Amino acid sequence: MKLDLLDRKILFELDKNSRVSYSKIAKLVKTSPQVVKYRVEQLYANDILLYCWPMIEYRAMDYFFGLHFIKLKNLTTEKEKELYKYLNSHQHIPIIMRGHGYADLIIAIDGHGIHHLNEIMQDLNNKFGDLFLDWDTVIPIGFSKFNRNYLIGNTEFTKNVAFTGAPVNAELKETDRKIISMLNTNARVSTSEIVQKTNLSYENVVRRIKILEKNGVIQNYTILLNHVKIGYPRYRLLVKFSGLTKNEEKKFFTYCNFHPNIIHHLKVLGNWNLVIDIEIESTEKLREILSDIKSKFSKSIQKIESTYVYEIDRFRDIPLEYPELNL
């Protein structure tokens, strides 16, 4: 399926807010709601739009997040199937990315505290340790999402950057977690379906979602694209700084925000300081970005490593709770 400008405009609006109504998107892209609905259905049918998901403040959900970059060895076809079957069936592994370069596998593990996280890592190592050549772990401390401006050739920066990592003082009820679970499976799930499966009133569901958004538990609703099919492969960069001042840090963040192909900026603790996601047409274009970054921030950047992400099995902030609600 070849994307035309209308498809790109629709994806751009869904990237900014994937829960927005077809009517509102139609007004923004100057077409009818029926056309928008048809186009979105075609994007799903052709595996270009994989799913819509909410950015959740995982700390408010009592999760501790670890991000792991793994180099694999001795990976036969049979072992690969076994490994990814295990990863995709694990409730507490909400991000699974397959790659080439610095890492062959990138996963996020969400545990209820650092000890639970360690238990999950140990279990994974016990089962598949013979496949792991090297294992690099960082702890995320602030995830920022920028608009996919490359979709429509937009050069503006993202004014209201969605961010997870800030402390959130919110007491969540079980009903809140059930609503979040359904949104986490599909951010476009209708209010009526949430009502039906949670036995809450329509008004209560609408009110609870607004409170979750206001309190910062739900930061944003966005999308997962098949970046290979749209012709903008994803690269995940690890960046190590040396002597980075606050001023230089702000400049680098602004640089990422303004760049149309940089979609995520993730501050981390560990052997690395930053993770960046770039969706771009070619390796030549990627080299241009890396050269530009190294030139503009030569005094601060110590090292950059990149991984070409050829497939994403999952990409969410938190595990899927209450799976029975999503059957």
Image (tube, grey):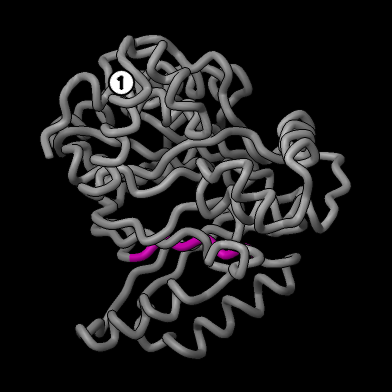
Q: Is residue 103 magenta?
A: no
Q: Is residue 223 left or right of residue 124?
A: left
In the picture provided, is 263 more to the left or to the right than 179?
A: left
Say which residue label 1 marks: 9
Main SS of the magenta part reads strand
Report whether residue 162 is seen. yes
Q: Residue at x 31, y 27 (%)?
A: 261
Residue at 20% over, 38% down? 230
Q: Residue at x 51, y 89 (%)?
A: 126
**In terms of depth relative to the viewer, which is nearer, 243 or 236?**
236
The residue lying toward the viewer, choosing from 286 and 223, is 223
- Image quadrant in which you'd find residue 175: bottom right
Q: Position of residue 2 (x, y in %)?
A: 11, 34
Give the amino acid at mark 1.
Answer: Lys
- Where, quadrant-wise, is the N terminus in this rendering? top left
Examine the rendered structure and indicate whether residue 280 appears above or below residue 248: below
Does the magenta segment cover residue 109? Answer: yes
Residue under the image location 63 percent in, 57 percent down: 65
Above-or-below relation of 253 to 102 = above
Extent of the magenta region: 105-110
- Residue 309 on image: x %, y %: 28, 52
Residue 167 visible in rendering: no
Residue 246 % position (x, y): 63, 22
